[in-house]
Amino acid sequence: MKRLLRAMLMLALVLTIGAGALAEAAEVAGRIDFTENIAPYEGKWVTFDDGFRLYMPKDWSRLDVTEEQAQAGLFYSEGNGGSDALVGDVNMRVAVSFAAAGELTALDDLARDYEAVGFTEVTKLDLNGIQAVTFVNRADDYRGVAFYHTMVPGYVMMVYVTPCGAGNQTVNDVGSAILCSLSPRDAHE
């Protein structure tokens, strides 16, 4: 968790240069339209006041966020407590955070910024109507998506999943389903 926090702090510092907002639609590599039946687990929708939601494994629980994590922009964490029937003895977690967008105003800017600080497999995708950048940090064993706040200009939201799942197809599939489920919050939620 300390590695994830350190990486989030580094990213927050890179992103907090000023204020900005998504100015134009970027060309993306593809679109993912998530449906609950493609997730390899029974799930629950977790809805965020920030205008989006994620489809999480139903047996996972919300984890406490420390003061240090909150100061770094982390505001939500959920996990399997170290093991579950789905992935076995693999400690899986999801973290959701935010940072000021600074001078970043377009998806291309966000992708370049992630590449510049060393993330790999940076790809621009449309996830259920939300334009996002996907990224991987193999050294610290997490991956995620970043996107401009859906309601408040000038902020970037990030969703992280750990571990990446290299060598474990089920862990990989669970993480992919969570990240691909990123979608706009239903107006009735």
Image (cartoon, rainbow, N blue to C red):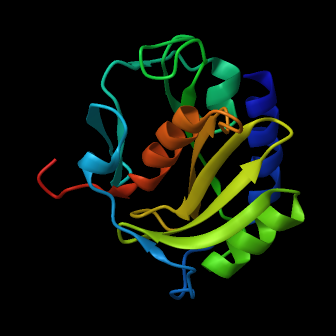
109 or 123: nearer the viewer: 123
Q: Which quadrant is home to the N terminus?
A: top right
Q: Is residue 183 above or below residue 94?
A: below
Q: Is residue 78 above or below residue 64?
A: below
Query: Can residue 103 be seen here?
Result: no
Residue drawn at x 50%, y 42% as measured from the top left: 173
Q: Quadrant of residue 182?
A: bottom left
Residue 76: percent from left, percent from top: 49, 31
15 or 46: nearer the viewer: 46
Residue 160: percent from left, percent from top: 60, 42
Residue 137: percent from left, percent from top: 78, 46
Horizontally, residue 33 falls left or right of residue 96, namely: left
Horizontally, residue 173 falls left or right of residue 66, namely: left
34 or 110: nearer the viewer: 34
Query: Can residue 52 be seen here?
Result: yes
Residue 116: percent from left, percent from top: 88, 66
15 or 35: nearer the viewer: 35
Residue drawn at x 62%, y 60% as measured from the top left: 134
